Amino acid sequence: MLKKMTQGLTAMPKQVSGWLRKKVQGFSFSKKLILIYLAVILVSVIGSSLLSYVFSAGSMREKTCDYLKNLASVTMSKVELSVENVENTAFYISGNEQMQSLLYQNFDEDDRISRYQQYDDVCDLLSYYVFLSQEIASIYINATDGQNYSYTKFNRVPPDEELWNEEREWICTDGHIYLRREMYRFEDQTLLGTMLIDVQPTVFYDIVKDISYDAGSIVYITDQEGSIVSGQNTEMTGQAFSDVLPVRDADEMFETVIMDGSRYVFYTGCEIANGWRLVLAVPESYFLSDIQKLQIHMAILLTVTCLLAIGLVVAAGKGITRPITSLSDAMKRFGQGDFEVSCEAEGEDEIAVLANSFNQMVNDIRTLIDEAYEQEMMQQEIEMKSLQMQINPHFLYNTLDTINWIARMNGVDQIGDLTYSLGNLMRYSLSKKDFVTIDEELKNLRDYVEIQNVRYGDRMTVSYEADPELLDTYVPKLLLQPILENAIIHGVEDKIEPALIQIRIYHEEDDLYMVVEDDGVGMPQEAIEGLLDLHPANSMKKTIRRGHTSIGVNNVNRRIQKVFGPSCGLQIQSQLGSGTKVTLRMRILRQPPDMRLEYYSG
């Protein structure tokens, strides 16, 4: 029987779901639209309300915890100040030379007058410190010779005998707070006695009482043994804290505790120097009350919103579905082969746009085949023209070789050399290699210089000095040519006397240096900044000289830093009339690097 009931309950959701699906499928589009709108509105409003409550509650709890933490910090700073005052008083008493001298004196038992005088002197000193401190109620001293001294502001009960043997410094017991200190003689560290300072509990009670909080809140100060230092009243001093509140003893902690049927947020603060800490407890209802009021207002707003939404959705649904029905009929006719069909559209909303698009689609389909054919013919014609305009690089190389040999056959060797160097430059520039050996880079540079010598002749001399060990190392292609071109533009063109350009390649440990130095006219600082401009757009705008821009030099700098990182790159040194020196710093590469890495590390 139970099994049948279980199977029946399991089947009920499926049956309800199937029935609901059938009912919805039988609805018209306008009813489905209304249901969807209502579902979206309800889900959005309810979801936003729940999220708002969760986030608001969390935010309020966070702020409350922060407030508790700050409040505990401020309160315990006051407590710590009072504790320091008492401890300082104990230190002053122990270190008082007169007090040490009085306690160290020994008298015969028959010398009563001297003993009375000693007792009065010690008590006078104690009275001074008692009245000097507002935190202290009484001071007791148990000397090693068995003599007891004391002074009290009020009628206080003397401490129990067992307190003198306690090992703790701070002792909370039976409504009293004591500070226990042993007194030693400075000269030989002889034990002079034990001191108990009776602290007024009202001092710490007043600090706790000053915390303005909800009536249901709880504030306690506890010592390192778990005893109450100060609580809701002075009579609680010395009670075990575990007997009052069910919270754990841990360093700085927030926790939620259910107590007397109510939820409390507890904050246990960090210990101060003497091991005391503050415990604050706030009812959750304290910081959730405003959120609960907000929820009531949101519930009212939700109800009003739903009623307005129902009216608006019903009215809007009829206006939306009418043009949709007309469009649906037109599409059915088009599907049956009526290519002359059209749908009348009114207004400028999305349905009207859809109807106009449908009409446009019908017109486009009529001419689709003709247009597709025409486009195919045009595409073929464009491709043919593009093929006709392409030049095979090998054909260009062969043509240059032909010019070279024709020039040599006719005795014009200079044209042959120039054509040969130009062909080498083109092969080198169009090669697919990103990294070349220094030997290959220098060969390309010599071809470039060969071409420039035709123009400048004796006005320019280029010297090469390269470490033979570095000729088979790899560098990015086309590094030196832009630098040499810049040296010619800035160092040779404006110089009347012949110019010397020196190219040196050397290394220091793992660093490779390529230097291009000329003795030309030099450059001002503005020109150097233009050459090293890191923004290509700016480099294109800054015309350095005769239409030449810094984009080539800047490109070399960016390529070096892309391969070797920002620590490498170009350095330019130049002054007007003193020539220019460009230094390229890189790492030594014995083989082409893997550029999938961000930087080549060597």
Image: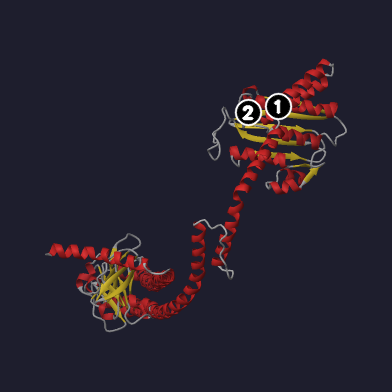
Q: Do the CB atoms of the residues marked 2 and 1 lie less than 8 Å apart?
A: yes
Estimate how packed mark 2 is, as few (under 14), some (14 to 19) or many (20 or more) residues with alpha carbons within 10 Å: some
Return the disc, 2 or 1, that comes first in the chain's sequence: 2
Q: Position of residue 522 (x, y in %)?
A: 80, 39
Q: Which circle marks residue 436 in the picture?
A: 2
Residue 552, image quadrant = top right
Q: Compared to 183, does 383 lie above or below?
A: above
Task: Write down the residue under mark 1.
Answer: 444
Q: How many marks are shown on the rendered structure?
A: 2
Q: Compared to 123, does 575 lie above or below?
A: above
Q: Position of residue 9 (x, y in %)?
A: 20, 65
Estimate how packed mark 1 is, as few (under 14), some (14 to 19) or many (20 or more) residues with alpha carbons within 10 Å: many
User: Can you say which quadrant of the picture contains the N terminus?
Assistant: bottom left
Q: Position of residue 490 (x, y in %)?
A: 80, 38
Name the residue nearer the viewer: 154 or 77.
77
Residue under the image location 78 percent in, 18 percent down: 405
Q: CA distance from mark 2 to mark 1?
A: 11 Å
* Amino acid of disc 1: Asn
* Amino acid of disc 2: Val
